[in-house]
Image (tube, rainbow, N blue to C red):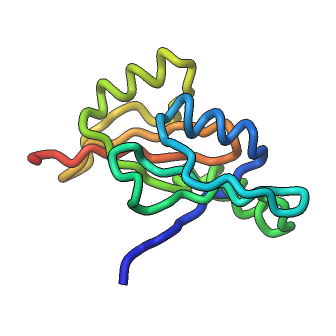
């Protein structure tokens, strides 16, 4: 068994598509119209056959209170691994990305948390000692 798709609820699909591709650097895997919405997944260009991230519309009534509570408590909706956190932090900051937590060491990892502009906090992690 392996993870095929995981998702993050987004407030605006077009805005999310721009952020997750142009800013974070993921590439579109599937973009299929479904009624008034879309099945929109992105993948890492380093692993195009790997786990897909579904940019899922947050229209269900339970989603907004859930997302709001996570953000209020500083809990990331997803975590992405990077090779050099400080370089990635600088690159993203130069693109105007807002970080709620600057890079810091946390045991076996170095981590930071950013705002994805679509209602979520996203954690970036660099494994230390690898």
Q: Is 82 placed left or right of 6 in the picture?
A: left
Q: Is 104 placed left or right of 56 in the picture?
A: left
The residue lying at 72 percent from left, 54 percent from top is: 68
For residue 8, which quarter of the picture? bottom right
When the figure is inspected, residue 5 is found, relative to residue 44, above or below; the finding is below
Residue sitting farthest toward the bottom: 1
Q: Which of 124/48 is in front?
A: 48
The residue lying at 61 percent from left, 59 percent from top is: 54
When the figure is inspected, residue 127 is found, relative to residue 21, above or below; the finding is below
For residue 105, which quarter of the picture? top left
Q: Position of residue 56 (x, y in %)?
A: 70, 59
Q: Is 127 placed left or right of 80 in the picture?
A: left
Q: Position of residue 47 (x, y in %)?
A: 35, 52
Q: Position of residue 71 (x, y in %)?
A: 63, 50
The residue lying at 54 percent from left, 57 percent from top is: 53
Quadrant assignment for the N terminus: bottom left
Residue sitting farthest toward the top: 94
Residue sitting farthest toward the right: 36
The residue lying at 57 percent from left, 46 percent from top is: 28
Count the numbered circles shown: 0
When the figure is inspected, residue 6 is found, relative to residue 125, above or below; the finding is below
Q: Which of 73/95 is in front?
A: 95
Residue sitting farthest toward the left: 129
């Amino acid at each position: 068994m392996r993870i095929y798709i995981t998702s993050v609820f987004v407030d605006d699909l077009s805005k999310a598509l721009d952020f997750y591709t142009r800013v974070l650097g993921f590439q579109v895997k599937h973009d299929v119209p479904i009624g008034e919405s879309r099945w929109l997944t992105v993948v890492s260009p380093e692993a195009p056959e790997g786990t897909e991230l579904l940019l899922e519309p947050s229209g269900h009534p339970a989603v907004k209170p859930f997302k709001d509570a996570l953000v209020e408590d500083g809990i990331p909706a997803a975590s992405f691994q990077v090779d050099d956190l400080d370089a990635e932090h600088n690159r993203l900051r130069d693109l105007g990305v807002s970080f709620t937590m600057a890079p810091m060491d946390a045991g076996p990892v170095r981590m930071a948390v950013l705002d994805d502009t679509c209602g979520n906090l996203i954690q970036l992690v660099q494994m230390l000692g690898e």
